[in-house]
Image (cartoon, grey):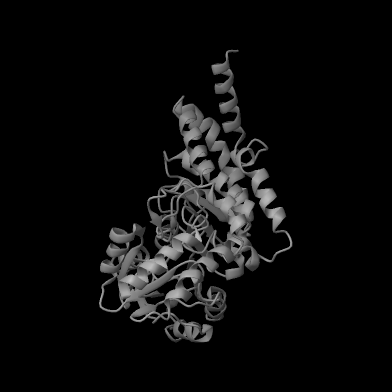
Amino acid sequence: MTPTDRRTFLRRTATLAGAFSVNSLFRQAHASDFAAAAHAVRDLAPAEVAQNEDYWSVIQRAYSVNPDIVNLNNGGVSPSPIVVQEAVERYNQLTNEGPSYYMWQILDQGREPLRQKLAALAGAKPDEIAIDRNSTEALNTIIFGLPLKAGDEVIGTKQDYPHMIEAYRQRAERDGIVYKQISFDFPIEDDDAIVRAYEQAITPKTKLIHVTHMINWVGQTLPVAKIADMAHAHNVEVLADGAHSFGLIDFKIPDLHCDYFGTSLHKFLSAPIGSGMMYIQADKIEKVWPLTCASSPHSADIRKFEDLGTRSFPIEQGIGEAINFHEGIGEARKQQRIFYLKNYWSTRVQSMPKVKLHTSLKPEYSCAIGGVSIDGMTPQQVAGALFDKYKIHTVGIVWENISCVRITPHVYTRTADLDLLVKAIGELAA
């Protein structure tokens, strides 16, 4: 065997072994460094580790982010660590050696181990987890699949994600359901007030409450479990949009007491771009129609939602390395670090003249995403100036009663990046 043949053989063998083997890319590239960094902070609580820059420098080096741009729009989509990118590339190379063989005979066999790992991460049963492409697909599958009929009511909010709002409006137009929206003025630091607002909208015809776990515009965290407990007391089901909470907040899906849940894995889990996950309680799967065709649409098998035809097996299998990376950090440490980074910049600008925060500083009501505005400037003007003058990438938000710039750090974000942000906001406000 020539050296080239040997390298090809070893590459193929490592690829086929998958992310959950001793030969995973994460194990090869980061396991020892992550373990050593964790050992150095073993006596510190997660909130203390959050401020240990030596520890987080190890994590930061595992990303390939452009040093010429400070990316603070991770609330839209997050970059993947280098090992996740490499995993997708290797799976893609393998696929193209013989697509119909390697896709359907080899990579397709990796879905069940991946389902089990995702279920463990979510605290759910494997048969309650479906793998898809993003939150929109997961949540739309449920929204369009629930057997709602004319006159049935659904309660959401004006601050929910537009794709979900549009889906309910389509069902209202097509099927005659009644879609009701309540509205909040965030930030709110009162669980009872939030729960009460949903409860007051319930009528005998209400069948479903749609709750966004973390509001994507400003990062407000809603008390999903309390809302769900209230809803269930009225015989109302709950669908939770966890696009921004999964892989960020240290929780398990059953902790939310919801009946249905959808998320994107390419946000805070840092999985390949175009990956998502759906959860449906086992006893409710049978009644939900698949969004695409299925040979047995009334089956109680969660896999009926995965009949998507040809899709990206490399992206799907790359999720495994993202899970390895995530677990190498630890959920509690990750949440505490990103919360620390959010408060690192927001506490420094909150007292600046003309600057207003639109997000709570308390951990019960926020984590990563923060909203900020400057009097006399539109969100688009602020976002534009941040990029043009300081090369800080953010996004201006104007939606319903929300008008601000969304700032979202991630584990690879350096405090020096946020020092620049604070400086920039101060100069723009002045």
Tell whether 55 sits left or right of 345: right
- At 70% from the left and 64% from the top, the residue drawn is 44
Residue at the top extreme of this rendering? 1
Q: How many marks?
A: 0
Q: Could you tell me residue 101's position as x and y percent? A: 49, 27
Q: Could one spot residue 177 in this view of the protein? A: no
Q: Name the residue: 46% across, 82% down.
A: 188
Residue 317 at x, y percent in the picture: 53, 41
In this view, 59 is above or below 385: above
Residue 401 in view here: yes
Q: Nearer the viewer, residue 419 or 155?
A: 419
Image quarter (top left, top right, bottom left or bottom right) of the N terminus = top right
Residue 101 sits above or below residue 315 on the image: above
Vertically, is 365 above or below 74?
A: below
Q: Residue furthest right?
A: 43
In the image, 299 versus 343, the foreground residue is: 343
Q: Position of residue 117 (x, y in %)?
A: 62, 49
Q: Considering depth in this image, is 430 or 267 the residue closer to the camera?
A: 430
Q: Position of residue 180 (x, y in %)?
A: 36, 77
Task: Please state if 358 lies on the left or on the right of 260 as rendered.
Answer: left
Q: Say which quarter of the image contains residue 204.
A: bottom left
Front one among 310 and 19: 19
Which quarter of the rendered picture does the C terminus lie within? bottom left
Is residue 197 depicted above or below 414 in this figure? below
Residue at image coords 44%, 86% = 200
